[in-house]
Amino acid sequence: MSHAPTAALDARQAAIRRAIAGRDLDALVVTSLANLTYLTNFSGSSGIAVLTRDRLIFITDSRYLTALEQTCGTPYECPRTEVVVVDAAYDVSLKAVLDGMPSARIGVEAAHLSVSRYNWLRREAGRDRDARELVATEGIVEAARARKDAYELGVMREAARRLSRVAARLGEIAAAGRTERDVALAIDSAIRREGFEKTAFETIVASGPNSALPHARPSERKLVEGDLVVLDFGGVYDSYCVDLTRTVSLGPASPRAREVYDAVLRAHDRAIAAVAPGRSRFDIDAAARAVLTEAGMGDAFGHGTGHGLGIEVHEEPRIVRRRGQEAPPDEAVQPGMVFTIEPGAYFPGWGGVRIEDDVLVTDSGAELLTEVSTRLMELKG
Ligand code: GLY
Ligand code: MN
Ligand code: MN
């Protein structure tokens, strides 16, 4: 559940109203649950909002009325929200809402509306309404979400402190003889005990050769001396996600393990040093990639350097390799953006290393939100 104060919700809604006015739209139908949370604090699993230039109509069903009342109750209020309770089906209620509006150009979220619902709306909500136009839009609310407001930053700083405390306990948790699944369970339990609502994704514990798989699922493999173990975990705190990875060695690290670890750590540090307002997100990725390429490990780093964090664990901005020559308009990172820096190097059959932290772009540079040592831990084998 998110607890953003009314003033923050007001400001977010006002920003979206400006964005839709700038696109000559009269309303935006919001069907992304993450976008609904951002605009209204709603944390149920079904709802639709229709944001017009001066109204917010929230459509949900009876299962979530109590949640909505809690969300809107004091001390937090949903500003000027008109609630519509679904009687038969969401589409029918949405059509009724749209039919009751004089609006002519209505935006829908192309990435969050099924083709069948879009077709149905076009057919049904457009009936007897020659002047109505449904307009597919991309990323209007997501673009606003990329820059966190003061409330969100407070939540994310606290979440990162808590996740760092979990990371500080990895030395006790990842022990020889334990299976990857046992270790993942212990991490999940530590995450819950730190006050997180839930884990942000399925915890990754990848040991020995499994650590070569960037998104391995924990298996019954037992950790043994000589393993590198990638531990990647995240938590959702007051609706916001944080995400952290450390790679540890069970027993003394081999010279090759240390070489790979040191190269990934230099890539991590170099990318963080490159974070500053106005910097190209592609240049931040390139900073990490250059280090690994110089170390002869460029091909072993297949994924992007990082991703935005917020209500979703993967959101804007994407800190990735530049593709093609075209410069997209959202290339520069801006103050208030929070994203991961998580370079890695993976060698099939041998293993891999990833080191991940969460950073905030400030007015003058970067603030590291997660704080836990990046030195290679050599645990008792
Ligand atoms: N395990 C998800 C991530 O680090 O992005
Ligand atoms: Mn992660
Ligand atoms: Mn991540």
Image: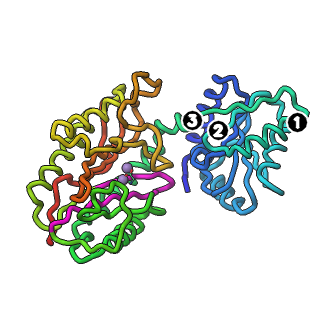
Whether label 3 touches label 2, CB < 8 Å: no
Judged left or right of residue 336, residue 371 is left
| Residue at the (15%, 66%) spot, across then down | 226
Question: Percent position (x, y) of residue 315?
Answer: 47, 43
Residue 139 disc label: 3
Instruction: Answer yes or no: disc 3 within 8 Å of ligand 1.
Output: no
Q: Which residues are magenta?
A: 226-245
Task: Please tell me in which quadrant of the rendered image residue 108 appears.
Answer: top right
State whether residue 115 is above or below residue 133.
Answer: below
Q: Nearer the viewer, residue 119 or 243?
A: 119
Q: Which residue is mark 2?
A: 109
Judged left or right of residue 316, residue 47 is right
Q: Earlier in the sequence, mark 3 or mark 2?
A: 2
Q: Amino acid at mark 1?
A: Arg
Q: Nearer the viewer, mark 3 or mark 1?
A: 1
Residue farthest to the left, as pictured: 255
Q: Amino acid at mark 3?
A: Gly
Instruction: For the N terminus, give its image quadrant.
Output: bottom right
Q: Which residue is mark 1?
A: 127
Local crowd size for mark 3, using a 10 Å CA cut-off: few (<14), some (14–19), many (≥20): some
Q: Amino acid at mark 2?
A: Glu
